Image (tube, grey):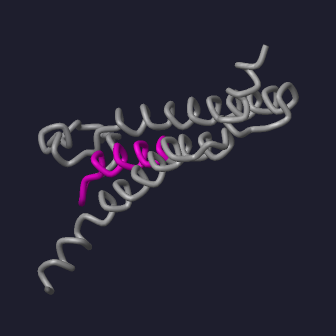
Amino acid sequence: MLAFWSFIQSYFNYWACLILLMIGLYGIITKNNLAKKIIGMNIFQTAIILFFLSTAAKKGAGIPIIELGPDHAAAETIRIADYINPLPHVLMLTAIVVSVATLGVALTLIIKVYRQFGTLEEDEIIDQLRQP
C-alpha cells in the first residue's frame, strides 16, 4: 500500500491533469447550459497547459542563460542536460493568452445568444430555432 501512495505522490501533477481533463470533458459533454460548457472548456484548456508544463519540468536544471567570464573557461563545462528547455514554457504562455481570448469571445457570444433567445439552455435554443 505504501508503494501505491508513493507512486501517486511522485506523479501528482499528472493525476491532477487527468482529473481536470475529466472534469472539463464532463462539463462539455453533459451540461446543456452554454455557460457551463464554456467553463468546462476552460478547465479542459487549463489541464492541457498544466500537463505540458509538467512534462517540461526537470529536477536540478537551471535556466538556459550562460554567463561566460573574460577567459571563456565556462564554455568547456557546459552540458545541455543541465538546462531547462524554454520552448514548452513559451508555447504554454501563448496558449494561456489564446485561452483567455477564447474565453472572452465565447462569453461575448453567449451574451448575444441570451439577448436573442432569452435562455442559455441548449435544448430550449434548438426548440426556438426549429419553430417557424
The number of discs equals 0
Residue 72 relative to residue 76: left or right: right
Q: Which residues are magenta?
A: 44-61
Residue occupying image coordinates x 15% and y 86%: 2
Percent position of residue 78, x then y:
17, 42
Residues 123 and 107: in front is 123
In the rendered image, the residue lying farthest to the front is: 132
x and y, in percent, of residue 56 in the image: 29, 45
Q: Is residue 86 above or below residue 82?
A: above
State the residue at coordinates (16%, 45%). 81
Check the picture and name the quadrant holding the C terminus. Answer: top right
Image quadrant in which you'd find residue 106: top right
Q: Is residue 61 above or below residue 11?
A: above
Main secondary structure type of the part rendered in magenta: helix
Depth check: 86 or 98 in front?
98
Picture quadrant of residue 16? bottom left
x, y percent for residue 76:
12, 39
Determine if the magenta segment contains residue 71: no
Q: Position of residue 116 (x, y in %)?
A: 85, 25
Residue under the point 65% across and 30% down:
101
35 and 45: which is toward the camera: 35
| Residue positioned 30% across, 41% down in the render | 69
Say which of 87 and 20 sits in front. 20
> Left or right of 8: which side holds 49?
right
Q: Is residue 45 magenta?
A: yes
